[in-house]
Image (cartoon, coloured by chain):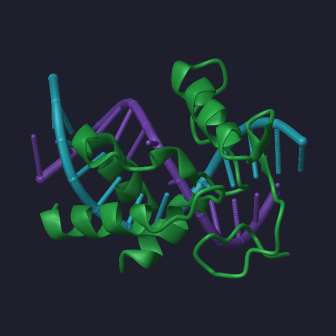
Chain colours: A green, B purple, C cyan
Amino acid sequence: MSTEALEAIWRAVRTIPRGQVATYGAVARLAGLPGRARLVGHALKVAPAKLRLPWYRVVGSGPRIAFPKNTRQHAEQSRRLRAEGVTVTEGRIKRRNAGNLDEMLWKPR
DNA sequence: GTTGTGACGACTT
DNA sequence: AAAGTCGCCACAA
Protein backbone atom coordinates (compact mmCIF):
# COMPACT_ATOMS: atom_id res chain seq x y z
CA MET A 1 0.00 0.00 0.00
CA SER A 2 1.22 3.47 -0.86
CA THR A 3 2.30 5.68 1.96
CA GLU A 4 0.23 8.46 0.40
CA ALA A 5 -2.90 6.51 1.19
CA LEU A 6 -1.79 5.95 4.77
CA GLU A 7 -0.93 9.61 5.19
CA ALA A 8 -4.23 10.68 3.67
CA ILE A 9 -5.97 8.53 6.24
CA TRP A 10 -3.92 9.91 9.09
CA ARG A 11 -4.72 13.45 7.95
CA ALA A 12 -8.42 12.64 7.79
CA VAL A 13 -8.38 11.21 11.29
CA ARG A 14 -6.72 14.37 12.53
CA THR A 15 -9.69 16.42 11.31
CA ILE A 16 -12.19 14.71 13.56
CA PRO A 17 -13.18 17.31 16.16
CA ARG A 18 -13.05 16.71 19.87
CA GLY A 19 -16.16 15.15 21.25
CA GLN A 20 -17.17 13.70 17.91
CA VAL A 21 -16.55 10.50 16.07
CA ALA A 22 -16.31 9.29 12.49
CA THR A 23 -16.76 5.81 11.13
CA TYR A 24 -14.04 3.86 9.35
CA GLY A 25 -16.00 4.17 6.15
CA ALA A 26 -16.34 7.92 6.52
CA VAL A 27 -12.64 8.32 7.16
CA ALA A 28 -11.92 6.26 4.07
CA ARG A 29 -14.13 8.51 1.96
CA LEU A 30 -12.56 11.61 3.46
CA ALA A 31 -9.18 10.25 2.49
CA GLY A 32 -10.36 9.68 -1.04
CA LEU A 33 -10.48 5.92 -0.64
CA PRO A 34 -14.14 4.99 -0.79
CA GLY A 35 -14.96 1.42 0.07
CA ARG A 36 -11.70 0.82 1.82
CA ALA A 37 -12.68 0.98 5.46
CA ARG A 38 -10.44 -1.96 6.28
CA LEU A 39 -7.47 0.00 5.10
CA VAL A 40 -8.33 2.63 7.67
CA GLY A 41 -8.09 0.02 10.39
CA HIS A 42 -4.76 -1.05 9.06
CA ALA A 43 -3.56 2.55 8.81
CA LEU A 44 -4.41 3.17 12.43
CA LYS A 45 -2.72 -0.02 13.49
CA VAL A 46 0.54 0.91 11.80
CA ALA A 47 0.38 4.61 12.63
CA PRO A 48 3.45 5.87 14.47
CA ALA A 49 2.52 6.70 18.06
CA LYS A 50 4.45 9.90 17.51
CA LEU A 51 1.60 11.27 15.42
CA ARG A 52 -0.67 11.28 18.46
CA LEU A 53 -3.69 10.50 16.32
CA PRO A 54 -7.13 10.59 17.93
CA TRP A 55 -7.64 6.97 16.91
CA TYR A 56 -10.33 6.52 19.52
CA ARG A 57 -12.62 8.87 17.57
CA VAL A 58 -12.83 6.32 14.80
CA VAL A 59 -15.63 3.85 15.30
CA GLY A 60 -17.39 1.12 13.43
CA SER A 61 -20.70 1.57 11.67
CA GLY A 62 -23.54 1.64 14.09
CA PRO A 63 -21.82 3.61 15.41
CA ARG A 64 -20.09 1.24 17.77
CA ILE A 65 -16.69 0.56 19.23
CA ALA A 66 -14.95 -1.71 16.76
CA PHE A 67 -13.08 -3.79 19.31
CA PRO A 68 -14.68 -6.80 20.95
CA LYS A 69 -16.01 -6.24 24.45
CA ASN A 70 -13.82 -7.15 27.34
CA THR A 71 -10.65 -6.29 25.50
CA ARG A 72 -8.21 -3.74 26.78
CA GLN A 73 -8.60 -1.64 23.66
CA HIS A 74 -12.35 -1.55 23.92
CA ALA A 75 -12.15 -0.27 27.47
CA GLU A 76 -9.47 2.21 26.54
CA GLN A 77 -11.44 3.65 23.65
CA SER A 78 -14.60 3.95 25.72
CA ARG A 79 -12.68 5.69 28.46
CA ARG A 80 -11.12 8.21 26.12
CA LEU A 81 -14.38 8.97 24.34
CA ARG A 82 -16.21 9.48 27.60
CA ALA A 83 -13.41 11.77 28.67
CA GLU A 84 -14.38 13.97 25.71
CA GLY A 85 -18.03 13.93 26.58
CA VAL A 86 -19.15 11.19 24.24
CA THR A 87 -21.70 8.84 25.72
CA VAL A 88 -20.84 5.19 25.26
CA THR A 89 -23.10 2.40 26.47
CA GLU A 90 -22.39 -1.25 25.85
CA GLY A 91 -20.02 -0.35 23.08
CA ARG A 92 -22.54 1.87 21.33
CA ILE A 93 -22.17 5.57 20.78
CA LYS A 94 -25.07 7.75 21.69
CA ARG A 95 -25.59 10.66 19.38
CA ARG A 96 -25.80 14.02 21.01
CA ASN A 97 -25.94 16.72 18.38
CA ALA A 98 -27.27 17.11 14.85
CA GLY A 99 -24.03 16.11 13.15
CA ASN A 100 -23.87 19.04 10.81
CA LEU A 101 -20.83 18.02 8.82
CA ASP A 102 -20.92 14.84 6.87
CA GLU A 103 -17.59 13.88 8.32
CA MET A 104 -18.43 13.61 11.93
CA LEU A 105 -21.43 11.86 10.77
CA TRP A 106 -23.24 9.43 12.62
CA LYS A 107 -26.00 8.21 10.66
CA PRO A 108 -28.09 11.29 10.32
CA ARG A 109 -31.29 9.53 10.54
C1' DG B 1 0.13 -18.15 -6.14
C1' DT B 2 -3.21 -19.47 -2.27
C1' DT B 3 -5.21 -19.15 2.20
C1' DG B 4 -6.56 -17.26 6.36
C1' DT B 5 -7.16 -13.31 9.19
C1' DG B 6 -8.52 -8.86 10.22
C1' DA B 7 -9.29 -1.74 14.37
C1' DC B 8 -14.86 -2.69 8.07
C1' DG B 9 -19.44 -2.18 5.78
C1' DA B 10 -23.63 -2.83 3.13
C1' DC B 11 -27.20 -6.15 2.43
C1' DT B 12 -29.94 -10.17 3.07
C1' DT B 13 -31.85 -13.80 5.73
C1' DA C 1 -31.82 -8.48 16.80
C1' DA C 2 -28.46 -11.76 15.07
C1' DA C 3 -26.02 -14.29 11.79
C1' DG C 4 -24.60 -14.92 6.93
C1' DT C 5 -22.74 -13.40 2.63
C1' DC C 6 -20.03 -10.75 -0.22
C1' DG C 7 -16.94 -6.89 -1.52
C1' DC C 8 -12.89 -4.67 -0.10
C1' DC C 9 -7.48 -5.52 0.41
C1' DA C 10 -3.03 -5.53 3.27
C1' DC C 11 -0.20 -8.86 5.28
C1' DA C 12 1.85 -13.05 7.04
C1' DA C 13 2.64 -17.87 6.43
Who is closer to the viewer here, A37 or A108?
A: A108
Residue A43 placement, left or right of A22: left
Residue A95 sits in quarter: bottom right
Q: Residue at x 59, y 57 (%)?
A: A18
Is residue A70 placed above or below A104 in the rendered structure? above
Who is closer to the viewer here, A12 or C7?
A: A12
Q: Residue at x 34, y 45 (%)?
A: A52
Who is closer to the viewer here, A42 or A11?
A: A11
Is residue A88 placed above or below A69 in the rendered structure? below
Who is closer to the viewer here, B6 or A5?
A: A5
In the image, residue A109 lies at what x, y percent? Answer: 85, 75
Residue A19 placement, left or right of A49: right
Residue A26 placement, left or right of A88: left
Q: In this rendering, does residue A36 appear at all?
A: no
Q: In this rendering, does residue A109 appear at all?
A: yes
In the image, residue A96 lies at what x, y percent? Answer: 84, 60
Residue C11 placement, left or right of A93: left
State how many labels appear.
0
Residue C12 sits in quarter: top left
In the image, residue A101 lies at what x, y percent? Answer: 65, 81
Q: Residue at x 59, y 29 (%)?
A: A74
